[in-house]
Image (tube, rainbow, N blue to C red):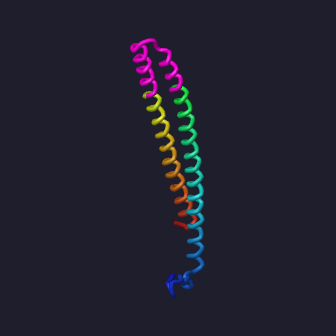
Amino acid sequence: MAKRQNGALDLSGIGNEQISMLASANGAFLGMLAKGARSYAESVGSLAKEYSDFLCERLERDVAYGEKVAKCKDWTEISEAHQEWLQEAGQEYAEEAKKAADIGMRVMASGSTIFADGTAESMAKSGK
């Protein structure tokens, strides 16, 4: 059994079998961390690209809306253009929120799978 002596961890009481099992578990854990970090980084990149693309498209539509309003001849035309813009923007923001939620769900599912697979692998290696 490991004991502390003068603040240091004394591992002299641990047998080779326990050290081997601990090393195997640590390897599986580090593998899970690496896979999880990669999955997270890829998902963050995917989300950032999605937001960037959406914002660029919305900006183009907003500029087009401003140009349309500038050409309006009366308040009725401005009101119609504004209602159209509001409806379009609202729908697009709702669709974008769904896409972001879907990406988030994929991140969660991926993390759960990585953890479950790594745990199973670690248990198999330890003989449990």
How far from the left and from the top, in percent, is residue 54?
A: 53, 33
Closer to us: 9 or 21? 9
Closer to us: 30 or 40? 40
Closer to us: 118 or 39? 39
Q: Give the overall secondary structure of the magenta segment.
A: helix
Tell me where the magenta segment starts and ends, as one range.
62-89
How far from the left and from the top, in percent, is residue 58?
A: 52, 30
Which residue is pictured at 53% across the width and 83% down the height?
8
Position of 112 relative to 83 (above/below): below
Closer to us: 51 or 39? 51
Position of 128 relative to 96 (above/below): below
Which residue is pictured at 51% across the width and 66% down the height?
128
Which residue is pictured at 52% across the width and 20% down the height?
67
Which residue is pictured at 39% across the width and 15% down the height?
75
User: Does the stretch in magenta take in 77?
Assistant: yes
Q: Quadrant of residue 56?
A: top right
